[in-house]
Amino acid sequence: MNKHKDFLLNKITGPKDVKKLSIPEMEKLAQEIRTLIVEKDAAEGGHLGPDLGIVEATIAYHYVFDAPKDKLVWDISHQTYPHKMLTGRAKAWLDPDHYEDVTPYSNPDESPYDYYAVGHTSTSVALATGMAKARDLMGQRENIMALIGDGSLTGGLAFEGLNNAAIEPHNLVVVVNDNQWSIDKNVGGVVTSLKKLRDSNGQTAENPFKAMGFDYRYVADGNDLSAMIDAFKAVKDVDHPILLHINTLKGKGYEPAVKDEEAHHWVSPFNLEDDQPLAAENQKPTSNSVALDVIKEQIDAGQKIMAINAAIPGVFNLDEFKNEYPANYTDVGIAEQESVAFATGFAKEGGIPVLMENSTFLQRAFDQLSHDTAANDLPVVMLVAGGTISSQSKTHLGIFDQVMISNLPNWIYLAPTTLVEEKAMLEWAIKQKKHPVAIKVPSDVPETDHQIVITDYSTINYQVKPGKEVAVIGLGAFYQLGEKVANKLGATLVNPLSANILDEKALDQLATDHKVIVTLEDNILDGGFGQKVASYLGNKDVKVLNYGQNRVYTDQTPVAEIYQQNHLTLEQIVADVQKSL
């Protein structure tokens, strides 16, 4: 039900309606948009600070430019809520019954005003350079703009894009939305450079953008609607590359988000009255607390450990750690390639890097996982979070980490089934010096199931609980699903410990003793664990059934629906096995 029927936004069906508004009306519209962002995020969760800070720039863009003919490429696109409201999708914020109508990132399947499905960082300028070149070749004249910020300038692809954007012979505008933050505080030399520009009102001689060849413009208050309209009018239809640097306030309009930018970059559902999360905080041990306890113990024992992350301290609950152990903590910014290469260099010099990555972001660093770490066989320790089938946007799926890591030489990819096992695996990984070791950080697993915990993973020896006819191999977090299947069938239950190192002796015995072998993995099937098992057993007289997610992009699809589509429910698996016997 739309409780905001008096909002001006109800009359905005597209940018043509924005162009009819006066400055006071647009300022009222900005207030309405902020109210709706906060209300929906409080109910549903979502990106908060980035969207609140970009409101005036978004309104000004649609007031001045002629979308969708003129094109704006959003970097990451986690700040597109205002854009979506102004391009025919306002009901998804005005009416709670329609909150699920839109995805949280730009999506060309959703609207002609969105040009890409984008959810990762630093891609906008590079995409815009290709669009501008195509426009030039086809003799067209539309404006091409890339909006980058919120930490994205620390990503390597941003520099690659800027390098080429600076020599575009015709129109190309890069807007740097400088709010001094990514998810955590921005880090590195880019921070120093942007600060000099802000402090000098864009007048410092140390201007890296001018040095590259850009026509540089600066807006001291990117949340001033009139200033942004004037700035956009000044760059519209200009026939050369321009960099427009705007200084904005992340979280503007919601005081808690201004005071604590990191905590309000992305939020879980919260109480509007006191800004407190609706879900109670988990006091039990978690995969993060277990990992951090091990790292702290090892540092206190004298190990030269460096905890490394790429602008995602919150994913691993690193805020307390970075304050307690500042000499043992490095945040490289949104730069996964740098994080993996940094860790590799740290290992080469004899240090112990513990690299903390998110599955979906790790794909940016595939070359470094292979070329720098694996090819040099250096003992990098890597924790991979979020490697699971999920209801995320198609830009944020965590189902590719096993395929990336497991199929590279020298990498060992361990998959704990309990928190106790995670602890043992991390302690071993830190101790060993032979190979790079990744650990698939488990989510929603028990602390222990009273298993005998292995302390040496130099050789993988499957843990087997005997049963009859059927053997169920449950990898990592899917061991619990395997347990349920095995109980239903009276089957053998196997913990394989590793996503890519097979215990061939155990598999030979399982094939001899069973008619059907079932593999379960919380990841994509193609190139995954199950296919490795099936390939090894290809010449054996045993049927192998592989279960995981098919090679498709899901987009905000409920997990239960994904399980159903991929025959991952207990009932479906049991029925399949019984049919195959």
Image (cartoon, rainbow, N blue to C red):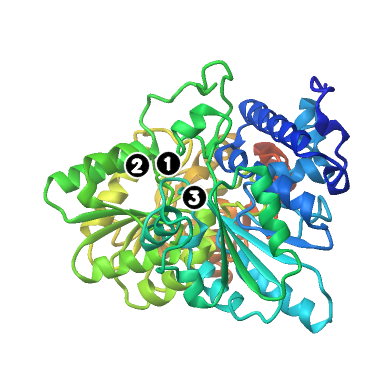
- Say above or below: 388 vs 190: above
Q: What residue type is disc 1 on?
A: Gly
Q: Quadrant of residue 100?
A: top right
In the drawing, does residue 254 fall left or right of residue 290? right
Q: CA distance from mark 1 to mark 3?
A: 26 Å
In the drawing, does residue 221 fall left or right of residue 180? right
Residue 87 in sight in this render: yes
Residue identified by numbered label 2: 318
Q: What residue type is disc 2 on?
A: Leu
Residue drawn at (67%, 53%) of the image: 394
Where residue 166 sits in the image (x, y, percent)? 58, 76
- Nearer the N terminus, badge 1 or badge 3? 1
Q: CA distance from mark 2 to mark 1?
A: 6 Å
Residue identified by numbered label 1: 314
Residue identified by numbered label 3: 475
Q: Quadrant of residue 559?
A: top right
Q: Are marks 2 and 1 in contact (CB under 8 Å)?
A: yes
Residue drawn at (47%, 76%) of the image: 211
Q: Quadrant of residue 130?
A: bottom right
Where residue 384 sits in the image (x, y, percent)? 43, 52
Where residue 372 sits in the image (x, y, percent)? 37, 75
> Which element carries disc 1, helix, strand or loop?
helix
